[in-house]
Amino acid sequence: MNIHEKYMKCCMELAQNGMGKVAPNPMVGCVIVHKDKIIGKGYHEKYGFAHAEVNAINSVETRNLASLREATLYVNIEPCSHFGKTPPCADLIIKTGFKYVVIGTLDPNSLVTGRGLQKLVSSGCDVKVGILEKECRELNKRFFTFHEKKRPYVILKWAQTKDKYMGITNCRLQITGHETAKLVHQWRGEEQSIMVGTNTALTDNPKLTIRKAKGSNPTRILIDRQLKIPSSFHLLDGSVPTIVFTSRKIAAKKNLEYVVVDFKKDTLKQVMQELHHREIQSLIVEGGVQLLTSFIENDLWDEAKVFTAEKSLSVKADGRGAPMMKAKRVGSKKVGSDLLELYDNRE
């Protein structure tokens, strides 16, 4: 690992502190190095708050301010060049007097891409780009997918018995254990939205909220073509922002919005377009076999997280089989008594 990779890794470690808090912005970390010593560091803490570069510069002690013109600023993604919730970071870097800047990867956002880099180069900065680029892109996989594919980053998640059943028709079945539930709630806090279909909502009456971990509740997404879900169910209780995709026009209520789609056309394409329009960058699909299979068959997913319990289904006549897919398994681990397998569908 060379010196640039060493400090870029520091940027990425800092950036991860913004997980689940900064979307639709990317997770960004920044370190300022002078004579092989970090004299400033910061990360983007929350959407609408100061960016990583600002926090890193502000963290530099007064006695080190004179060193900034000789220091190198490292950041894992291209500094912004436009006015958004905050002023352009590229302008601040130039104003501060940095002559050396190292960037992990360019920003795919059309408002930024290449413009921040060009500003720095035009001002006379010596800029290096592409340090640990693959790792920097992976860190912000949701952000890159959103801007490059014009849809949220889609994570499929389900639990199955040892003999690959997800449940029993019209009957709620608890398959996995307590440790798995805690992990799933943690995941919910890291993503912007979570989706189920009509059958799952009717059978399980899920809350789709975080109760066993810390974090913010994701926006709940429900596909309910004929509005079959009773108003007394958790998903329609107005406690969490919820979007219902349906064929019927109905007025919005507190934290509850109905979006009409044409179910005679490509339903998921319309849903993905609407979520993109709303700047929702990530989606967990926790639905049943039908909904999960639709995402798989339409190749609208990026990764899958599949839990397999030690128990088998005793009443197989009414069993609902788990989805079938062909994908690359990239990892596995035990979570309590359950086995978690990870699959990747990206190129």
Image: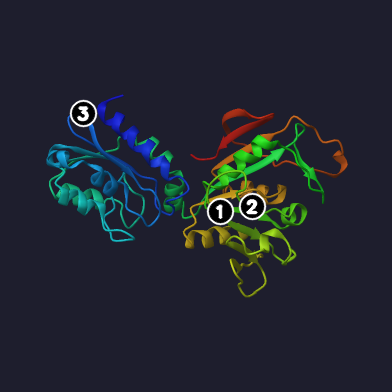
Q: Position of residue 161 (x, y in %)?
A: 75, 35
Along the viewing direction, whichever of 40 and 277 lies nearer the viewer: 40
Along the viewing direction, whichever of 342 and 88 lies nearer the viewer: 88
Residue located 85% across and 39% down the image = 316
Q: Which quadrant holds residue 109?
A: bottom left
Residue topped by disc 1: 218
Residue 19 visible in the picture: yes
Q: Badge 1, how many Cα within 10 Å: few under 14, some, many 20+?
A: many
Q: Position of residue 54 (x, y in %)?
A: 27, 49
Query: Are the two marked residues, 2 and 1, in contact with CB atoms closer than 8 angstroms?
Result: yes
Instruction: Identify the mark nearer the N-term, 3 or 2.
Output: 3
Amino acid bearing label 3 = Asp
Asked which secondary structure carries label 2, the reply is loop
Q: Badge 2, how many Cα within 10 Å: few under 14, some, many 20+?
A: many
- Residue 208: give its label: 2
Cα separation between marks 2 and 1: 8 Å
Query: Are the two marked residues, 1 and 3, in contact with CB atoms closer than 8 angstroms?
Result: no
